[in-house]
Amino acid sequence: MKRAVFAWAFLLSSLAVQANPILSLPIPNNNRVQWLLQGHRGALMPHRPDMEQLLGRVWTLSAERRVLYRQPLRATPYRGLLFNASHLGNSATGLAVGAGFSMGQVGVHGLDYSFAAGVGYVSKPFDAVTNPLNNAIGSHFNGMMRLQLGYSGKQISAHIGMLHFSNAYWRSPNLGINLPYVSVARGLGVSVYEGRHSYAYYPTRQNASFQSWVFWPSFRVGKVEYDLDDRSPLIKSCLDLRVQHTRGDWRQRSPSFGLQLFHDPLYAYEKFQGMQSTGFRSQAELAAFAGMEWTMDRWGFQVDLGWYLARPDRRKYPFYEGVGFNYYLNPRSRIMVRLKANQFSADVMEWGWAFAF
C-alpha cells in the first residue's frame, strides 16, 4: 500500500513539473555557505503610552546560516536560516527566542539588507493575575519578524535593524514587542558549495525570453481573538484570485495582481453580546491588490498592497498590506503564510495553499 502511494505521488509530481517547463528550469549550483554571528544592543520600544512600563535595555545574540548565490561583478542575493535569543530588559517580559527564514542581498560595495520571518517564544506573556504589566503580548508562541540594513565586510559587519514579536491577534492582547537595535557581526565563510542540485521555479536569465502569465488561486485561513473578556476564537478566511507574471531570477522579480475576497466574522461581533446573527455579505470584504514576489530555489518572499472595493462598514482603513513567505512544493503548487495588516496594525496571520493553472 505504501509503495503504491509513493508511486502515485512520484507520478503526479513528475507530471506537474512536466506540465509547465517554464517553471522548472535548473539553475547553476554556484551557491556558497556562510555563518553570520551577531551581538545586538537595543531597547524594547514602547510605541503606545500605556506600554511605558515595558521600556528596557535589550541584549540579543543571533546566528544566521546564509546560502549566497555568487554573481561576478554583481550584487549577491542570499537565503538563510535565522536563530536569535533576547533578554527583553525587564521582569514583565522576560526572554524571547526566535527562528525563521531570511532573504536578502549584499551589494557590490557591501550594502546588506534582508527580511526574516518565523516563529518566536516569549517566556512571560500577559496574565491577568500573575503578570498584568505585560500588556504587549498575550501568548507564549508568536510570530517573529526582522528587518535589517547594514554593511557586510569579508569578516566584520555592522547593522541596524528592528526585531518584532507579535501573534496577529491569535491571542489577546497583541500590541507587539518592537526591538530596534545596533549590531556587530562576525562572518564565518565556509569555502564549500552546497552538495545538492537546486531548481529554480522561474526561468534563468539565459532563458528570459520565456515568460508567461500564471493563474494562482489560493485559499487561506487564520484564527484571531480580540477580546480579553471573551476568549471565543474567530476564524477569518481569504479567497485569493491572483495572476502572476513569471519572470527570471531573483533580481528580476515577479509582479502579480488580482482580487481577494475576505470573510471576517469580527463585523458581526459585539462586546459582551458575542456573535450576532448576520449573513455572509455583512461579513465579507472585496479588494483589488497588486504584489511582488522575490524567489530563490523553493522559497518566495511576497509583498502585497490592497484596496477595499466593498466592506460592511468603515471601521478599517481603505487599504491593507500583506507580507509573507511562499514555499514551492513543486513548480505548480505552493504553501504560504502571510501577515495581513491594516495601516500597519496586524489583522490576521493567514495559512494556505495554492495551485497554478
Image (spheres, rainbow, N blue to C red):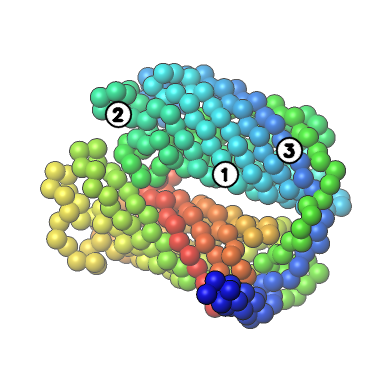
Q: In percent of the image, x 67 and y 46: which residue is there?
A: 80
Q: In percent of the image, x 22 and y 63: which residue is there?
A: 282
- Residue 156 position (above or below residue 262): above
Q: Which residue is mark 1?
A: 100
* Residue 228 shown left or right of residue 323 in the figure: left
Could you say which is closer to the camera, residue 279 or residue 122? 122
Question: Element under label 3?
Answer: strand
* Residue 108 shown left or right of residue 315 in the figure: right
Q: In percent of the image, x 52 and y 62: which residue is there?
A: 335
Rounded to the nearest whole Å, what is the CA distance between mark 3 and mark 1?
15 Å
- Residue 354 position (above or below residue 59): below
Question: Element under label 2?
Answer: loop
The spot of residue 231 in percent (x, y) is: 24, 43
Q: Quadrant of residue 344?
A: top left
Q: Which residue is mark 3?
A: 35
Question: Element under label 1?
Answer: strand
Could you say which is closer to the camera, residue 115 or residue 27? 27
Could you say which is closer to the camera, residue 114 or residue 21? 21
| Image marks 1 and 2: residues in contact by CB distance under 8 Å | no
Rounded to the nearest whole Å, what is the CA distance between mark 2 and mark 3?
38 Å
Could you say which is closer to the camera, residue 53 or residue 199? 199
* Residue 265 shown left or right of residue 203 in the figure: left
Q: In percent of the image, x 55 and y 65: which residue is there?
A: 334
Which residue lies most toward the front here?
A: 1
- Total marks placed: 3
* Residue 114 shown left or right of residue 140 in the figure: right
The spot of residue 213 in percent (x, y) is: 60, 75
Q: Amino acid at mark 1?
A: Gly
Q: Quadrant of residue 256?
A: bottom right
Q: Which residue is mark 2?
A: 127
Rounded to the nearest whole Å, what is the CA distance between mark 1 and mark 2?
27 Å
